[in-house]
Image: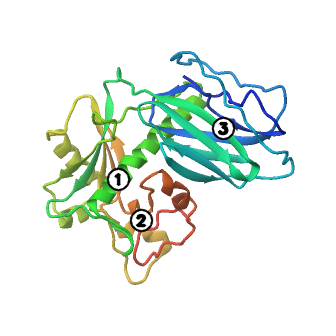
Amino acid sequence: MAMNHFEVSTTVEADKQIVLNCRHGEAVRHALVLLEGEIKPFTNEISCEGSTNEINLGPTQEDTTLKVQNLSNSKATEAFIYHKGQCHRWPVVKNRFKAFVKLDKGTNLLKVQCHELNLEKELSISYEKQESQQRYVRVVYIKCSESDGSFDAPDDVNNSLDMALEKLRFNVLLLQTFMAEEMNKHGFGYQTFELEQNENGEILAHVFTSELTTEKAHEMNGDQLYSWFHKELTSSSLNDKNCKFLAFMSCSHYDPPDEINPKDIPRYVKAHTALGGGQLGLFGTAGLHTWAGEVGELVKCFTDSKEIDKKRLFDDSAG
């Protein structure tokens, strides 16, 4: 399917409207949907960019009427997305905004509001899992034999095993959405990889305890770690011919000298890599503390300009 078209309300009682990148009654195959919106002047002629490979799940419902005030010179700074009793706010920049919504299986009713302009739009989006897809990605959090599964983080940040799993489950959804968006931009529709889920539709993240000690892991380079964990995972009960492992090592650790050379920062982090091939993609977690754990943390994490203390934590910001 594709969602290149833009959805607007059929009845507008002023000169502004919320235009979205998906239609009322749209169907998607990934749980975290990206809403792109724009606040535009109302015209009687609305152009819709063509879409192909649409999935028709039934008749489209009537569009919600927008009732707005005449505020032609006003600008919105925030958009509010309401879903399942929750509300998340998203910045509006030059009359445009992007927002993420975590969908439940089936029909999801959403409301988009710009309070400053008294604008509102409601729409429904259906999420249906790709039941026919046999191949899938299995998320694994690897901890060493004596480890509690904690990861590098500032003193005031939760770095427990449970927090690691929460961050991984959410960020693999972001990756899934990114793939769908990029495939669609290149003309293939919203195709993406399948993530392993339980019967309730929740993303699974497995904890795997390696026979490797943390001390030994810190002595190994990326290739050696990849070979070791590839062998362990493919020999374990987690192995499945239909799965690809997306694995993260909790043992990543930043250990700089007293005198830091900024050019050598990547050399100071142990058991941290980004390698993939065959059945395994392997990544370090030295920057995991900066990741969002849920939708409500996305804006804060992506706009955080606080400089990382390079004497204590790995700075992977490329800046």
Position in image of residue 295 (x %, y %):
48, 50
Q: Amino acid at mark 1?
A: Glu
Q: Which mark is residue 266?
A: 2
* Residue that numbered label 1 is attached to: 166
SS class of the residue under badge 3? strand
Q: Measuring 34% from the left and 74% from the top, which residue is drawn there?
A: 255
Q: Measuring 73% from the left and 47% from the top, which residue is drawn there?
A: 118
N-terminal of the pair, mark 1 or mark 2, is 1
Q: Amino acid at mark 3?
A: Lys
Left or right of 17? Residue 217 is left
SS class of the residue under badge 2? helix
- Is 12 in front, or is 252? 12
Position in image of residue 26 (x %, y %):
56, 26
* Residue that numbered label 3 is attached to: 121
SS class of the residue under badge 1? helix
The reply to whether discs 1 and 3 touch (Cβ–Cβ < 8 Å) is no
Would residue 218 be visible to someone looking at this image?
yes
Left or right of 279? Residue 52 is right
Label 3 environment density (alpha carbons within 10 Å; few <14, some 14–19, many ≥20): many
Above or below, 178 relative to 107: below
Q: Which quarter of the figure is the C terminus placed in?
A: bottom right
